Amino acid sequence: MARKKHSIQQSLNDQDVAGNGLLHRRLFLQGGAAMALSGYAANDITEAAEGLPVEPWMRFPTTEGFAPYGSPSRFEKHVVRTGMQQQANAPPGLGSIRTPLHRLDGTITPNGLHFVRLHSGVPDIDPDKHRLLIHGLVDRPLIFTLDTLAKYPMESRIYFLECGGNSQTLYLRKPIQAGVQRIHGQICTSDWTGVRLSTLLDETGVKPNAKWIVAEGADASGMARSVPLSKIMDDAFIALYQNGERLRPENGYPMRLFLPGYQGNAQVKYLRRIKVTEGPTHTRDETSRYSIARHDGTTLQFFLVMEAKSVITQPAPELKLQGPGYYKISGLAWSGRGRGIVRKVEVSADGGKSWAEAAIQSQILPKATVRFHMPWRWDGRPAILQSRCTDDTGYVQWTRDAMIAERGHTGNYHTNCITSWAVNEKGEVSHVYA
Amino acid sequence: MARKKHSIQQSLNDQDVAGNGLLHRRLFLQGGAAMALSGYAANDITEAAEGLPVEPWMRFPTTEGFAPYGSPSRFEKHVVRTGMQQQANAPPGLGSIRTPLHRLDGTITPNGLHFVRLHSGVPDIDPDKHRLLIHGLVDRPLIFTLDTLAKYPMESRIYFLECGGNSQTLYLRKPIQAGVQRIHGQICTSDWTGVRLSTLLDETGVKPNAKWIVAEGADASGMARSVPLSKIMDDAFIALYQNGERLRPENGYPMRLFLPGYQGNAQVKYLRRIKVTEGPTHTRDETSRYSIARHDGTTLQFFLVMEAKSVITQPAPELKLQGPGYYKISGLAWSGRGRGIVRKVEVSADGGKSWAEAAIQSQILPKATVRFHMPWRWDGRPAILQSRCTDDTGYVQWTRDAMIAERGHTGNYHTNCITSWAVNEKGEVSHVYA
């Protein structure tokens, strides 16, 4: 692996794979971490079992643990969604709350922490009364209930879901002083189960001139979005279950459109109607919002694929480093392009001057987040951490400079550029442009 | 595919793949379900969007949906764990609650519904005070805190976890009249994340005569189990995260041993100590329990691999059929043997006289549950539904008769035989031996 000299670093030793302390990703497996830990936590090492105190919780049984529906530990109360629940001048129910990515590991997001973006709050839908109508350019319009949908073959897939507006503050001229949850917390991965739309459209039949659909939600916002019929026939489905149980109310209960790899907003929640059409419908929700406004005054409409992206979740602005030593850089990477396979994640500790390939710790599934990590020896001096994702189409996550050059500061959606976390001499992490 | 004639069935038409109405698994994709549904739910079909009522939830926005930690819909209150929380003569905190498999779909189990088996309740462990000691036949005993473990590379894998005692009532002489939740509800699948034990044992070093370990929990039961060192070095890990968030208290918070494909009980929760040993320790928990008592008076000890198994979750005793017509038979299959790959699931509607291969609707991941389904035309006459799993080692899930012949009615663990659900003329489903 290429080793590039970096000015902050006096010299690179045999373990280094890139500037500023990035270490070979197999280092931990070669005993390197033990050395690190012996310096880091010498008082954690003992010679005998007797060194382990018998804590009070070992002395007496409890009768806890049999709740019909369980909850996290009381020691994890800080692991919650946060965000803008209601702004002063906004309509009721317009807001978003975001996933505490810096506190999580693995790739699946627990349902209770899935990000939420709502335009008119959660509708209190009676599932027995909810209907899905498929009509328009079809041979035979059909209405489906939850009971009838249950008779169809379902598909279960682990897919990411990212809000089209995730990370959009990176279009701002100055880096906002916020953490990974506020900036990037609208990306989650779940096991989604439902009925393929191609199956249902086989039932209704589709007219030869049909090329698009428009999907409408049953909440008060009446969210409506246009999607090419090719995508609908390829892999779209009506999602009914999220990580095994029925969809959560804030994620579309009792059903939502699911479009693997596409912008979250197009995956209409509380889905009540799919109309098959000749062309896009140009709804309010896809003209006033959810299109990319470029600096030359033009708009990128129906730009729906979420492109390759990665985010370092630890360290992050919310997590201060506790002095020089060995750390693990960890994060998430994903892509909605092509087959949605993450081919490579690279990490830099010197603001992009040198890069090294991270290890992927999770299973690599199409259009799902993967988790990467890399060992890092922090020398206590300022550093800038970055990550970049390459997908199976060869697409490489772009820099913020490249994104701004292309779209300008008026850009507002599909923010998939590289994020920079600066570490200062105190170990504080902050969001910078680099 | 072979088509066998069955006495109940007058004649098999072209769609049938096995006796008693089992249909080709691609039938739904060929328009067959539409015909079925037109008879089943004719009043669900309309000709225009105007046929859809504007329900009250579309009329006004709400401010709901922004909870820091979300919950299921109020319409899903019946989807809960149930079981024996406290029996009259049992010690405090001894019991189990089980997953409502008949209400779920997909493969991941939401954390709030993961089955629970506890021997002395959930200990209220302060994660900052919890310690993991690795000692015994090692060069250098080490204690790990949550903070030090966080510095190691982690691995994230989607694995099933099944209680060794799951389904054990099938050893009884008479089939218990209970449903899929009571009988089989101790199998779940999650995304588990943690540190490989081989990594930690690289740090401590292992003496040449080491062949086993014994793992001890920090709850009041002091659960202790022996595991061969070969398994520990192969793929065992210290699980710290469950579906992205910290382990749930009832599933081992803040850490548990994880042994992919092994009996759940051996995957010691609240893990505080791993002692490397020459041989098995023969602890109370693996001699008085969790060994298979055979009818010849011998015991199968350290029989830890959960063998290939499948369960039909819909229809199930909890779910009555609503008259003759088309249904979907759906269920879960898994194996801890070999690479843990489910190669095939077959379904029978005539008590095992004829079989047809089910479709697999989920991704097939090693040592994780897969979900299968098959269309079924129920003619309103009695039927017996069964499923059987074949894994990548060629092992075929055995019949109950074969299991009883081998182990007798004293058997009590690792109950992986075929289950039979009888459907009577009223559409009621019950547990039978067939």
Image (tube, coloured by chain):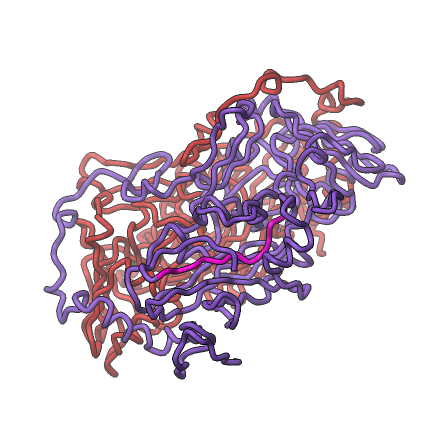
Chain colours: A red, B purple
Quadrant housing residue A274: bottom left
Q: Nearer the viewer, residue B343 or A97?
A: B343
- The residue sitting at 40% across, 68% down in the picture is A235
Q: Is residue A184 magenta?
A: no
Q: Nearer the viewer, residue B25 or A371?
A: B25
Q: Residue A284: image x %, image y %?
A: 18, 58
Boundaries of the magenta span: B413-424
Q: Residue furthest right?
A: B208
Q: Residue B97: image x %, image y %?
A: 48, 37
Q: From this viewpoint, is residue A392 visible?
A: yes
- The residue sitting at 66% across, 36% down in the picture is B289
- The residue sitting at 47% across, 60% down in the picture is A367
Q: Residue furthest front?
A: B173
Question: Principal SS element in the magenta part?
Answer: loop
Q: From this viewpoint, is residue A398 visible?
A: no
Q: In this rendering, is residue B387 above or below A107? A: below
